[in-house]
Every structure is written in C-alpha cells, then in structure tokens.
Image (cartoon, coloured by chain):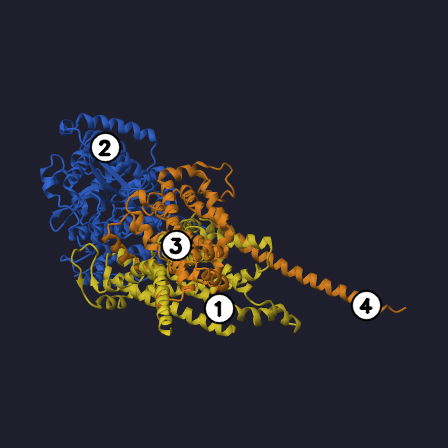
Chain colours: A yellow, B orange, C blue
Amino acid sequence: MRLIARIDHLIAVGRTTITGWAFVLPTILLLGIFGIGSVGYVGYLSLLKWNLINPIPQFVGFQNYISVFSDVNFWDAVGRTILYLVGTTVIILPLSLVLALLLQDRLNANRIFRSLFFLPYVVPSVASAIAWSWLFEAHHGLVNMFLRMFHLSPQPWLSSPGEALIVIMLLYIWQFTGYFVILYLNGLQSVPRHLYESAAIDGAGGWQKLWHITLPMITPTTFFILMMSIIFSFLSFDQVYVLTQGGPAQSTTTIIYYLFQEGFQFFDIGRAGATAMVLFAFLLLITFLQFKGESRWVHHQM
Amino acid sequence: MGTSPDVILEGALERAQAHIVRRWHVRSIIKWAVLSAFGVLFIIPFWWMIDTALLSNQHVFDYPPELWPSVPKWSNFLLALQQTNFLRYIFNSIAVSTAIVIGQLITASLAAYAIARIPFRGKKIAYGMILSTLMIPAQITFIPMFLMMKQVNWIDSYQALIIPFIGSAFATFWLIQAFRQVPQIILDAAQIDGAHHLWILWRIVLPLSKSALLSVAFLNFVFHYNDLFWPLIITQSDAMRTVPVGLSYLVANDGSGTAWNVLMASALLATIPALLLFVGGQRFLVQSVAHSGIKD
Amino acid sequence: MKLFHAKQPIAVFTIATTLGLLMMSASSASYASAASKPASAPVQVSFWEGMSGQLGNVLQSMVEMFNKTHPHIHVNAVYEGSYSGGGPMQEKLLAAVAANKVPDLVQLEIHSTPLFAANGALQPLNTMMAHSASDKKSDFLAGLLNNTSYKGITYGIPFNRSVPVLYYNPVLFAKAGIHSAPTTWSQLEQDAKRLTVRKKGQTQVYGFEPVNQWWFFESLVWSNGGQLMNSSLTKATFATPAAQAGMQVWQQMKNQGTLMVNSGPNEWSQTITDFGHGRTAMYIGSAGDMGQIKQTGVSYKAAFVPKFKAYAVPTGGANAVIMAKAPAAAKQAAFQFIEWFTQPAQTSYWSEQTGYLPVKKAAVSSPSMLAYYKKHPNHRIPVAELQFAKQAPLSPSYLQVYQYMQNAMDSIMFSNQPVNQALQNGVQSANQALQQAQ
C-alpha cells in the first residue's frame, strides 16, 4: 500500500514538475537567449579586438578592460554619470515626495494634477528631447526669452560645457517626476491609518507626524525610487543622442553614450563590450542592494 | 451679570474653529500655490510645443513670442506628415508594441502562474533565472543581439523588433505578485474538481487579475512605443522604421536649418498615440506605476 | 561633425520646369543600350542617401528623373539619416556590412572611406572608371579627388562635395571702412576689432563667428605648415607649435570679445542665422551654405579662408561608393547612375540648387556654368579655392582622431583651456586610439 502511495506521489510530483517547467519554458528560453545569452556574448566580445566588419576578430584577452580603465575619457564619463545621477536624484526625490504629500487626498483636482505630472512620462523621449532643444535654444528659446524679460543675461545652455548637462538633468526631472510621484502616492497609502490616529491622540502636530511616522514608514518606497532613479539616469541615452550627442567638449558624454560611441561611432566592439560588462556589473550590484533593502523592509514592518 | 459657562464654552469653541479654519486656509493656499506653480512649470513645454507647431515660418523667431498663434497654421501638421512616411512609422510602432505586449502577457502569465501557484521541482532555479535578467537593458546587450539577429537573417524585420522582447522578466515578476493575491481556496476548489492548470489560469486567475494585466500591458506598451535604441540599430529600410527613429532623423544635425514649427508638429504627432492611450487608460496606467512599487 | 551643406527651399515649379528641361536634354543624349535591350524587369539599385530637407527633395527628384529616362534601371533612394561623420547613416552602414545586408550604392562621408575600404566593404572603382566614357579620373576636378581613395585604389566618386569658405557682410564692412575681405588671419583679427560693435556693454555685432568644427581646424593647421598626422599615419601631430597658432588666434579673439561661437546640434544653422541677421560680420562655413544664406536675405560675399603662410583647405561632403557585396548587375547599374549624375548637365543643376561644387572639369568650363558664375560671382569662389585643397589623412582611425580634435577645440573655445594643453590632451587620446588600432 505504502509503496503504491509513494509511486502515486512520485508520479504526481513528476507531473506537476513537468507542468511547471512547461509553463515557465517560453519565458526561460527567451530570457535565456536574449538576456543571459546576450550578456555571455558581450563577455566574449569584450575579449576581442574587432570592428564588427573585419572578417577575422582577434582574441586579446583582458586588454580591452585594461585599455578602458586606463582611458581618461572613460573615467570622465563615469564622473559625469555620477554627477548626473546625484544631481537628478537629490532634486527628484524630495520634489516627488512633496508633490505626493500634497496630492494625497482623493480630490478631483488632485487627480488632474497627478495626471499632469505623469503626462511627460508617456511622451517619447525623442519628442521630449526635441522640445527641450527648442526651449533652451540660445537665441529664440523660451527659457532665454524669460531671462531677458527679467533682465538676466541669456545663457548658452546647450553650447556650454557647464550648462549642457544641466539641461539634460532638467529634462530627466520633467520626464520622471510624475512617475515617482505615483510611486510615492502608493507608498503613502500603505501607511496604516491607525498610526496617525494614535499620534493625533498623543497631540502630535503635522510636522511631527510627517517626521516620525510618514517618512520612516515610506523608506522602502524611497529606497525603491532611489534605485529606479539610479537605473533610469544610468540608461539615459535618447536625451543625449538628440540634444547634444555627447558634446560640447564631451560635457554630456555619460557612460551609456560612451558605450554607444565606442561601439557604433568608433567601431571598437571589444572596448564597447568591456564597457558594457562594467556597466552590467554595476547594475547587478544595484539590483542586489535593492533586493537586500527590500527584505530588510519586510522585517521592519513585521 | 456673569456670563454663563455655556456661552464661554461656545466662544472658545468658535475661536478654536476659526483658528483651525484659518490654519486650514493658509495651508490650502500654500498647497494650491505650490501645486499650481509646478503644474505650470510642467505644462509649459507642452504649450511651447503646441504654440510653435502652429506658428508660420515668419513668426517662429518673434520676440516676444505669441502666446497663442493669432492665425494657427494647422498645415504644419500636414507638412510633418508629408515630409516623411510618418503614418507608416506610427503604424509600425503601434503594431510592434502591441505584438510585444500580447506576447509578453502570454509568456509572462504562464510563467507567473507556475511560479506563484504550481509547486514544482526547480522552481527556485527558474525564478532566480528570471529575476537575474530583470536588470539587463538593451543598451548593454545591443551588440550581441544584433549579431544574433544577423545569424537568423532577421535584420530589418518585424521579428527583430518583436521577438527579443517577448520574454519579459519585468512582466513576469509583476504578474507573480498579482497571482499570489488570488485566494488559495478558489484554486483548491477548482483543483478538487479536477481542473487542469491551464483552465484554472484562463478561467479563474486571469479574470481576477485583470487590473494587473492591463497595467503591465499599458506600461510596457508605452515603454516599447517610445524605445529608440534598438529600432535605431536594427532597422534599415524606411518601411520598418518606428516613430522614435523617424523622429530622430528629423533633428537637423546637418546644418540644413531647423524648421522648428514643423519639427514640433512632428514631435506632437509622435506623442498622440501614447497620449490617447494615456487618456483612455489613465486609471490603469497610474495604477500600474504604483504597482511597480508594491512589494508584498 | 555636422555638415557641409545647406538647404535651399525652391518653389516646386522651379524644380519641375528645370527638371523638365533636364529631362529633354538627357533623353536626347539617351542611352542606346536602354532602347535596344529586351523588355525585362529593371535592375534594382538600392541607394542610401543622407540629404535631409530640401536637399533631399532635390536629390529624390533627380533620382526620379533618372528612373524615368532609364527604364532598365530602378534606383531606390532611401534617406538613412544624416550622412555626416558620427551621423546615423554611418552607424547604419556599419551595421549593414556586419549583417551582410548591404545596399548597392551609398553616399558616404569622405573621411570614412578608409575605414570601410580597409575592411573590404567597398568596390574598387579603378577599372570601371578607366573604361568609362565620361567618368575617368581625369574628368573630375583634381581637388575633389582628394579623399576618394585608400592605399592607391579609388573607392569613391565625388558626389556632394564642398570646401570651407569665408563669408562676409559687405554692408557692415563698408560701415567699418573696410573694402576687401581679409586674406590672412592677422588681418582678419584686425578687421574683426573694427567690425565689432558694442553698445551699453552688449555686443551687437561680432567681427567673426566661425563654426567651431574640426573641419576648419584642418585648414588652420595646414595653412601654417602644420600636419594633422605623421606621414605613416601612426601618430597624431596636431599639437605642434605650427598647429597651435590657429586656435591661439581664435581663443585670443574670443577673449578680446571680437569672436563668438555656437555649439550643439544646431550650431551650424545658428551661425548662418546670426550672419543673416547681421549679428556677425564674418564667418567661415561651407560652400554649401550659400543657399541658406540667400534665404536670410542678407547681402553677402564669399572669399577664400584666410591663410597664415599659404592657402590650404580641406574638402568635405560625401562620395558615391558602391558596396563590394552588391550583385554584379546592381554594381553596373549603380555606376551608370553615378555617370549620369556627374554629367555636366546634372552636376551643374545639382550645384546651382544646393551650393555643392560641380564635380566635373567639363561642367565648370561649360558656357552655361560660366554664365551662371558671371551672375553669381560668389559661387565661383569655392571652385577657385579648390586649387588649394589638401587631402585629409587616409587613416581608418581618422574618425577617432578628428573626434579628439573636436574635443580639444571645444575645450579651447568653451572652457577656455590653454591651447597647448587642450591640443596635447587631444593628441595623447588620439595616439592611444591609434595604438589600439594597430
């Protein structure tokens, strides 16, 4: 009897296992080829000296990594990317939090504002970037017209190595604030009401509630947004491609643009591959931190 | 004659109320002021785009600019449509994004159901594999993907624009969260009745997760509709181009003089499909973004 | 790099009528072979072009005309984004070669010829040209044969080519009491001081507003006896004292407030707009700018780019190249199209419509072109300047080298970095890239 039961059990387990794998198979196959497979392929390409059109690639080991790491332009691009990332994040994080706090109540007017802030996100980046290049145009752009109206001196914006990156940062903030506002709104909703009620009984004021309840309770959301923001800003390509093409004086060449330039403008697949692997390692680290942070939050709530 | 305690109390209450009302007033004034200020800042680029798109060539460089064109030149939009194969680009973008999203929903539903609801051996491995690809953007893998497409002779084809994105870690991850919320009791009941997993997925789980499905569909549609990087590399012929690619070619980086009004008209046209989708499916879209922050 | 051409909106009827005339002349000289061939499906030629806006319209209409007069060939011209260095078309072409899915005919930016030729992607044209009735090497303007070859083999036929030109505003010159264009850089520096107009601390007219592009830097270096790369093309040499002089003049002028520069993807058209609005008295641009300047309505004159020791200019634009992997029949048909396009009638028309140089000796000396030059003396300047044209280094890595020149120029003009330091940095990066490539 027990033997039969065991066999039955084994058959059942076998059957569910087959079913389970059959269900995940399409996804696993596709992601295996285009995700993991591609990364492996990049890893291989990063060991070659090749320009994509030469019939015979040459194996050079880790030389591309050495060459990328010893390239001043690479480190400049890293520095610039970090500047971009920090510059956008320190603005977009508080801004989206403040807007979310103001939009918490379920009012019709709030819904309109929420949509308004979110709207830029659905506009194709290329279209937004085109609008931006016209807004910040040196002679007839709206921004300089405003400056002139207030008797301030018009700025060269995209022509200035000091200002071009700022223009791209502003574009990023315009594009993604609404997205983060909604993430924050969601985070705010998940703060248990009873915490506020008991705080009110204790005589806590608005600021105290914000400081002692809201902010700590939404740290996971903040953490998540932080990660998203880092990844979004790391991968900002369209904006640079349309607005500045990395210039002037390379002042907007971020890592992702550097990678694109190595690969498709200088035709150096090996160095592009090495750069991609470095970037991938970094993203992996971010993802890892994200999941660690998330699990910590789960404990925190329990 | 002394005042009765009642009256004193009433006065105090009134004063307190007035205080609250006043504070509320100040607060709400600040609130609406801040919101309106940012609202204006956020809307200005749209207004500037629309305004410019409707200006005639002579008025584009006017100072001060017309806040609204006195004679809107709608023909700029016609010009924008004519100077390239714009309708074709829009068709391509919509067709490609729709195909991707449908494909993603199918593969991701199956995988998510298995991981959320089927206790099978090696589940952890499968789940880990899917998660590990969550953060592999096309910007990193475009060279090998291009070479793979070359192997199968798919360069400049719809397959190349669609197939690589059919498997989505993001969609799977998302649907796993949604499917986990379907009460176990319902599933148990179905299973006791001898229902097959596919049937349960199709008849019970999917209908209960409509909002998650729609959200992921909306969000990924917008994402792929707006994607420039991959289509830029993989398309060659005019007939295969998507909206962002066609648009990027219009940017005058070749000294041929920028017709800002027509360029803005093109940018607006490019935005219309996503905009319509947004207006139509705002509720889901907004929900969907919020969901991506939920971790349960 | 952005480009060497400008657009010129032409009334549609002008195109139509001129094309009508062209069509008549072309059909009278029609190909006997076309008529005698048995009726069969025409040979398809896919042609990647990089002409945007109105220039693209001119090109497309010419292609259409070719197709009408050549029933056995069908050229299919596709716009693949700007042809400029670092522009989308080069990226596309690289991808196409890598994917083994190439077009037949391409409008290729001249400086990228060595890269594609070195990898065997381009069809050598020596034999075809030698056997051609009209497109022998000796038929072309000598200056335009620069940057058409690699290692002694010809791969490109001049298509849309230009040279840098100095433009000046005669009205502003007269106001400043100057009667002729400067011929040397020191004279230009002096003139710019007199031409610059300031009011209430604001500069209303700049003396000089060059387009800040490496293409002009080539002229500055050569004119002073400098070289961009050594003769074996293994090292960059654009930081020698002779090579530095030009940027020193520019930087000095900028600091004196007599020079201004634009940047960004629209810098070129911005500069032309400024010139057109009288915000600058002089600028250097491309021969292909004339159409766009004319559009602004400003009165202008063209002159040679000033010199240090001797006149020296690079050429720019694109060549027509045939891809090595194209089918034999398509190669022949593509070559036939180029022959047609470079015929005096067509190349003159193209030149008049766009400002690019006519590519044939026969065109320049034809009565109709001579009459045209008489009416439009500015258009004669670039043709005359061609005698001073020099060849940019024929290195497959030149695309990177000029990028570093550009970065150095940007740092000098926008970040006010010392010329010596900026160029040294550029040379160092360029040499690193060159070493990598070996």
- Above or below B152: residue C428: below
Location of mark 3 (residue): B106
Q: Which element type, helix, strand or loop, lies under badge 1?
A: helix
The answer as to whether the residues below labels 3 and 4 share one chain is yes
- Residue position marked by numbered label 4 in the rendering: B8
Decide if residue C398 is on the left or right side of residue B113: left
Q: Amino acid at mark 1?
A: Pro
Disc 4 and disc 1 on one polypeptide chain: no
Q: Residues within 10 Å of mark 4 (few under 14, many from 20)?
A: few
Identify the residue at horizontal 42%, vertical 72% (top origin). Answer: A292
Badge 2 element: helix
**Residue at the extreme front:** A1
Chain of the residue on which disc 3 is drawn: B
Mark 4 element type: helix
**Mark 4 belongs to which subunit?**
B
Residue B61 at x, y = what percent?
44, 43
Q: Give the SS element for disc 3.
A: helix
Q: Residues within 10 Å of mark 2 (few under 14, many from 20)?
A: some
Q: What label does residue C67 carry, if any? A: 2
Q: Amino acid at mark 3?
A: Ile
Cα–Cα span, label 1 and label 2: 65 Å
Question: Residue B208: horizontal and vertical position, in percent?
Answer: 49, 56
Is B16 positioned to the left or the right of B52 in the image?
right
Q: Which chain does the numbered disc 2 sit on?
A: C
Amino acid of disc 2:
Asn
State the CA–CA distance, disc 3 to disc 2: 48 Å
| Disc number for residue A220 | 1
CA gap, disc 4 to disc 2? 100 Å
Q: Are marks 4 and 2 on the same chain?
A: no
Within 10 angstroms of label 3, few (less than 14), some, or many (20 or more) residues?
some
Calculate the distance from the C-alpha at mark 3 to the C-alpha at mark 1. Answer: 31 Å
Decide which of tag 3 and tag 4 comes sooner along the chain. 4
